[in-house]
Amino acid sequence: MPLASSPEQPQPLRVVATAVKGWVERLGAVWVAGQLIAIHRRSGVTHFLTLRDATAEVSVSVTASTAVLDAAGPLNEGMAVVAWLKPAVWLPTGRLNYECHDLRPVGEGRLLAEIEQLKRRLFAEGLFDPARKRPLPVLPRRIGLITAQGSAAERDVVVNTALRWPAALLEVRHCLMQGPRCAEQVSQAVYELDATPDVDVIIIARGGGSVEDLLPFSDEGLVRVVAAAVTPIVSAIGHETDTPVLDLVADLRASTPTDAAKRVVPDAAAELGHVTAARDRLRRAVLAAVTARADELAALRSRPVMRDPLGGYAVLDLQLRQAAERLDAAILRRLDDAQTDIRHLVTQVRTMSPKKTLARGYAILLADAETTITDPAQVAPGQDLTAFLKAGTLALTVAAPKESDDHADQPQPARGPQRAQLREGEGRPRRGRAPAGVGHGQPG
């Protein structure tokens, strides 16, 4: 019931605010359809959203907890949602607020939320890891193409492939590229092309479309088939705003079917230009190397040793002759020194030689070939002796030995004739002079 009041009897503000709070809260929680136009996340547990009516200029502020937002999945501004709201009045300020206890995307928003949840799950499994991406072949033997029959995507891939590399071969599989059977047919085509030995790369091409049209390319079954394929796969769905899961698991994402053709085959004209440029660089490099080697050869030929190969030997020959001269001089000096030493030694030997003594008039008496007579006691009368003189030898016979006196060591002249008899001859004794004593030799 309305509150009674007048200027004379006004109602206290707290009474009015409490009544409003009671009236609002009697409405209870209600499911509301709207469009999410603003999301303000805070650091605490309470966050603020703004919902607007889809057809009227009506918007309200909504509070939601972290648990409610996380349960709703990925939320984007502009997404259509249904929310379970409970109106409430904050009594200290009298402000009206809507508390959200449940939030669910609907329509396109629900589909995007489901896709985001699938992306999170596959990311956790590592299917989006860049390390799993396989490189495309430089020049594929055969290109697998999965697309709709007669579509613009097929024409773009075929025409641009032929323009860039006329010799390219295509293995085409026509499939439905939207609708309930799209994911199944595309998966079967991927199986077949992946099992074909000479297919080196597979292109899945479509010319864009709405979110609902692209839903088959986020099908979990199709995504896992593509992830398990051993042949590199290019996703060319032809969209920019939305990202199907196929783009994330494919080995290469192309923005359009035309871009896919450019990525898969090289441009023949550009490659020919590269070959020509490389050939020119190679020719210049070879000519530069030949020129450098020619310069090195000319520098070597200009060296003195190359102009006169025997010039170095002249110096060596001079050194050799000088060394030979020094060697000859050294040998001559050594020979002269040796001759001088020999002359000195010969002089010494001759000085000490018995022949020198014989030349001074002395004689050497021998009883036999090995016994030298140095003492008269060594001989007996009648004993034959041999006297060696300077000019020859004498055969002597001892008449009577004579003892030496105090001067026996000095040479004495012969005092009397001695009888001598030849051992061989006419048998007649021959007179001669014998030494006075038989000890030391006496002059003859």
Image (cartoon, grey):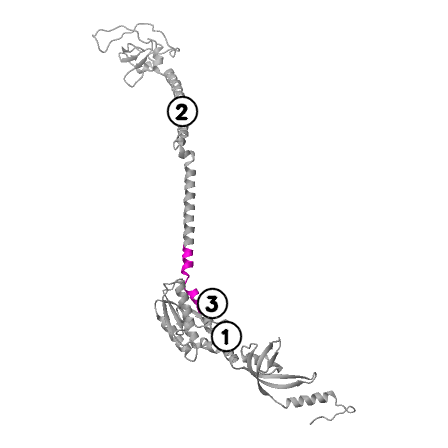
Residue sitting farthest toward the left: 426
- The amino acid marked with disc number 1 is Arg
Q: Residues within 10 Å of mark 1 (few under 14, many from 20)?
A: few
Residue type indicated by callout 2 = Glu
Viewer-side residue, 389 vs 412:
389
Q: Position of residue 38 (x, y in %)?
A: 60, 77
Measured in 3D between alpha carbons, the distance from the residue under mark 1 to the one under mark 3, in whole angstroms, is 16 Å
Picture residue at 51% right of the left edge, 76% below the top: 116
Which is the main secondary structure of the residues drawn in magenta? helix
The foreground one among 170 and 435 is: 170
Write down the residue under mark 1: 120
The residue wearing badge 3 is 130
> Is 326 situated above or below 130?
above
Location of mark 2 (residue):
325
Residue 262 part of the magenta-drawn span: yes
Using the image as rendered, state which of residue 280 and residue 186 is in the foreground: 280
Q: CA distance from mark 3 to mark 2?
A: 86 Å
Residue occupying the point 43% across, 74% down: 224
Element type at marker 3?
helix
Residue 170 in the image: x percent, y percent? 37, 68
Residues tagged 1 and 3 counted as in contact (Cβ below 8 A): no
Q: Does residue 382 appear to the left or right of 326 in the view shown?
A: left
Q: Earlier in the sequence, mark 3 or mark 2?
A: 3
How many numbered circles does the render carry?
Answer: 3
User: What span is colored magenta in the figure?
Assistant: 255-275
For the C terminus, give its image quadrant: top left
**Looking at this view, is 256 or 196 the one in front?**
256
User: Within 10 angstroms of label 2, few (less than 14), some, or many (20 or more) residues?
Assistant: few
